[in-house]
Image (cartoon, grey):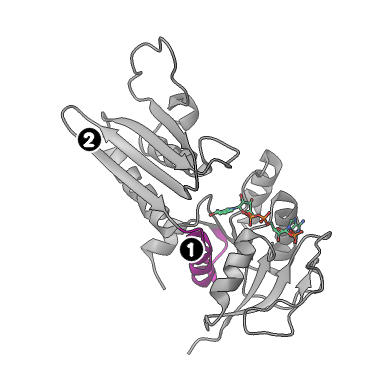
């Protein structure tokens, strides 16, 4: 049997970190050996009651980290910057779901992937990864059909359209050899005129406790194809990140995608 993967989590006390800790209980594929929180965290130094290592405590730094097979990061841009330094210095593969990164961090991540195995996703749902794959295929196979992307989320969400909707639009645009910047239509109101051929439209719904729903419509003459995904539980993101970490162990440096995990399961 393969040895348990020695895992580090960055952002271990957050919503996603807690969800990861919950899933790690009793999962023999992983041994959680380092759990990092922010420098100002009230959890710093307290015991982590998960991962099968009772003596493990939350830490606020990477200097004290033991040898790791993979790190999962759901912290934020500042946390990602620190863990990226650690992974580069130690050649450690990194799975990151942190969003809201600026252009400087994007450039650093691109460069880092020359030296470490890096897997990033704006959405760690395996279902959304398959949806993205199917949309890419459909957009290329039906080049003249209109594409519209509809997303729905809970009322507390701060940004629109969602990062996932934008990633879907980007995937569709790329498979038609255009950019999302040149084809996206984010709002329609008043006298909009006719739909522009080749454009990719977005529509947004907000309300209640919707975890996340995305529908990509390909609209032809007399028929319509709809590819839809509905999330009902946030733990899907943590589950996908763990599957990605398991897959990424020992991989060559590069920018890996969740779709790669699905295409070549371990
Ligand atoms: N890709 C996906 O599928 C997906 C899904 C959900 C969320 N996200 C993204 O993941 C990130 C975290 O989301 P969340 O909802 O879990 O946030 P959260 O609940 O606010 O948790 C953030 C965590 O990061 C820690 N942290 C903050 N600054 C840090 C630093 N400098 N170094 C180390 N740790 C640091 C926090 O520690 P303390 O609070 O203890 O100080 C906390 O543990 C966000 O960027 C979010 O957009 C991605």
Crowding at label 2, few (<14), some or many (≥20) Cα neighbours within 10 Å?
few
Could you say where residue 128 lies in the image, as x and y percent from the top left?
41, 52
Q: Quadrant of ligand 1?
A: bottom right
Crowding at label 1, few (<14), some or many (≥20) Cα neighbours within 10 Å?
many
Which residue is label 1 attached to?
240
Q: Secondary structure at mark 1?
A: helix
Could you say where residue 71 lies in the image, as x and y percent from the top left?
64, 67
Which residue is label 2 attached to?
224
In this rendering, the answer to whether 190 lies above or below 155 is above
* Residue visible at 39% across and 35% down in the picture: 149
Q: Quadrant of residue 200?
A: top left
Would the CB of label 1 be found within 8 Å of ligand 1? Answer: yes
Check the image and name the residue furthest to the left.
222
**Residue 243, magenta (yes or no):** yes
Q: Secondary structure at mark 2?
A: strand
Q: Quadrant of the C terminus?
A: bottom left
In this rendering, the answer to whether 183 lies above or below 236 is above
Please give the range of residues in magenta: 233-254
* Residue visible at 50% across and 57% down in the picture: 124
Indicate left or right for 31 with 224 as reference: right
* Residue visible at 64% across and 51% down in the picture: 109
Indicate left or right for 154 with 84 as reference: left
Q: Earlier in the sequence, mark 2 or mark 1?
A: 2
């Amino acid at each position: 049997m393969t040895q348990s993967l020695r895992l580090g989590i960055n952002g271990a006390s957050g919503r996603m970190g807690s969800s990861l800790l919950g899933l790690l209980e009793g999962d023999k594929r992983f041994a959680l050996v380092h759990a990092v929180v922010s420098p100002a965290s009230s959890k710093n130094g307290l015991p982590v009651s998960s991962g099968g290592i009772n003596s493990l405590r939350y830490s606020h730094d990477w200097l004290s980290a033991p040898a790791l097979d993979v790190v999962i990061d759901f912290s934020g841009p500042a946390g990602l910057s620190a863990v990226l330094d650690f992974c580069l210095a130690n050649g450690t593969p990194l799975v990151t779901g942190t969003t809201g990164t600026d252009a400087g961090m994007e450039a650093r991540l691109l460069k880092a992937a020359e030296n470490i195995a890096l897997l990033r996703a704006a959405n760690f749902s395996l279902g959304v990864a398959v949806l993205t794959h199917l949309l890419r295929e459909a957009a290329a196979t039906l080049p003249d059909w209109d594409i519209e992307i509809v997303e729905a989320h809970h009322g507390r969400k701060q940004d629109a359209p969602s990062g996932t909707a934008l990633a879907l639009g980007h995937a569709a645009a790329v498979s038609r050899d255009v950019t999302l910047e040149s084809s996206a239509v984010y709002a329609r109101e008043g006298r909009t005129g006719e739909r522009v051929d080749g454009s990719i439209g977005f529509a947004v719904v907000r309300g209640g406790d919707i975890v996340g729903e995305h529908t990509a419509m390909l609209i032809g003459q007399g028929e319509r194809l709809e590819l839809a995904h509905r999330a009902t539980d946030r733990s899907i993101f943590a589950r996908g990140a763990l599957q990605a970490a398991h897959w990424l162990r020992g991989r060559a440096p590069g920018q890996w995608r969740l779709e790669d995990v699905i295409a070549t399961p371990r």
